[in-house]
Image (cartoon, helix red, strand yellow):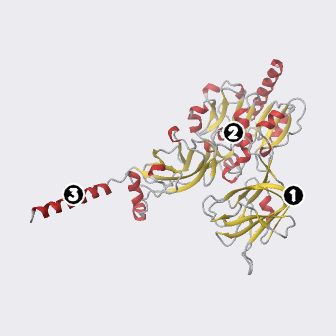
Amino acid sequence: MDQKVKASIACIFFIASLLGFSSCSKSFYQYQETVKDDAAVREMKNVSPPTFDNNPQLDMILTNRRPILSVGNPRRPPKPYTLAFEISSDPHFPMSRTTHYNGIERQNRYISEKQVEAEDELVDGTYFWRARAVDIDGYFSKWIQTRFTVDVANSRSFSGFLRAPVSHISVLSGEDPENIIDWSDQGQITYWNNAPRAAGEAYSWVMLDMGKPTPVTRFWMLSTRRTSPAPGWLTHFVWQSSDDARNWTDITGTEVRKNDTYKNIVDFTPVNTRYYRLVIYSQNALQAQLNAIIPYVKGEPEIPNVPDGDYVLIVGNQMNGFTYTQIAKFVERQGYTTITIPHQNISLKTVRALRNKPMAIILSGNNADFQYLPMFEYYGEFEIIREVDDIPMLGICAGHEFYAMAYGLSFANWMGWFADTMFRLTKGEKPAPVHILPNYAGDSIYRGLPNPFRAVEIHSWAISPLFIKDVRHEEFQVTARTSYIQALKSSKRPLYSEQFHAAAVNDYNQSSGYLINFLKIAKEYHLKAAISF
């Protein structure tokens, strides 16, 4: 063969080998992308993915630029595994705009979590997050993917939005429309479905009669209690306004097409009118579903008229603004006056403007899952937690978790199971007692309590241990625990918390002394402050 031909062939093979080498030199992530959808491989190797049933879930708004990301562990994994997380502002996860975390080990049998590293701090905006399991042999599950928003800028003080009461609700079709505005339904469990569309109907509608012209500027909407696609999600809708409930005008900026989420925050320039109508053009099933609509106006909470003398200010964290347990009755039996303020109507400015400062502040529990609540309503309370240093404060259950969530909404998470003490007792189970940690056994907050002690619990969320490990939060000290954090104390301020319910009165509960001791501590603090003043 001619030497020139041989040389040409050799050159071709050399170039081909380089190309081949290049194609085999894809990054680990590019390689995984190539085979991750091979269902046969996944089925053969039986690698289950984690689950997005924790915090954050779809379209939750996070309030720290180094959020903690939590997932449910893979179900029944046959082999040891770790997890991989990827975060990107691009849903296609390009390498140049994606943060990768590998080798994430499970926190416990139920959940795994990872905090965004300092060098990867996020800016405000929308992010896509995906996760998968990788077993000990290097085989991996499919990616699962969700979306969340970081908004620190608008979360540092009271949101500036007040609920606008609805006088009457009506619908084109369907039953029980009152469920849409049943804000006393703490878990937003009840709902309305429209009837399947009749002949000649181009759309369905829900009308809110405000009773008088009201400058609404935001609607919060919940459609199902499912954060993965579920029947009933609205897919195309618009809000309209009217002065007479007959002639309607679309409100600029409120039309949403190709909606792909279970809840919506619809903001617009205020429209001062009496009637508002949600026009539903389409949904992802035969019937639309709405669990809740809350209209908002701009404003600041009114300053409440508080009692004279010593009193305890209770923040009601239920959806309806009240408390889960009967905290006020418990406190009043100890000889103190109380006033309860709904969480959506309190702010740092409100507390500072009170004509008589409270002896103590108690933050109540809440029996709803946070992904189904308008969490911006709690921003005023979160500011109080971060800033108040001269009033003794106690967080109970959700109020305890808020000590972490005030610094970042994902700093508390779902435990993966439900702690219901009294129900477990009826099944013959033995709930774990609360152990006071050795360094705090002599603390006055635990005076008279046995160690360990029995406590009543009913919750499924808890403070993440990563919150405590974060040096930015070293002020908070864990004073008691079971398999998770049960109580906190501040090293700088008169702040205490309890995951359990000391105010629940029954023969099983031994934790009532915790709340009684807190009130004594608050009273002593108040007296010393008055003397020094």
Q: Is residue 14 above or below residue 351?
A: below
**Front: mark 2 or 3:** 3
First in sequence: mark 2 vs mark 3: 3
Residue at image coords 80%, 47%: 321
State how far apart marks 1 and 3 are (Cα).
Answer: 79 Å
- Name the residue that disc number 3 marks: 14
Residue 430 visible in the picture: no
- Amino acid carrying mark 1 in the image: Pro
Pick whichever, 83 or 8, lies toward us: 8
Where residue 46 appears, x then y in whole percent? 43, 59
Which residue is at the front of the view, 15 or 172? Answer: 15
Given this view, does label 1 or label 2 mark the residue nearer the observer? 1
Q: Which quadrant of the rendered structure holds the N terminus?
A: bottom left
Tell me the element at label 2.
Answer: helix
Q: Residue furthest bottom?
A: 199
Res 442 visible:
yes
Q: Which residue is mark 1?
A: 213
Residue of label 2: 400
Residue ranking furthest to the front: 4
> What separation in Å lies between label 2 and label 3 (alpha carbons)?
67 Å
Residue 29 x, y percent position in the rendering: 41, 53
Q: Give the SS element for disc 1.
A: strand
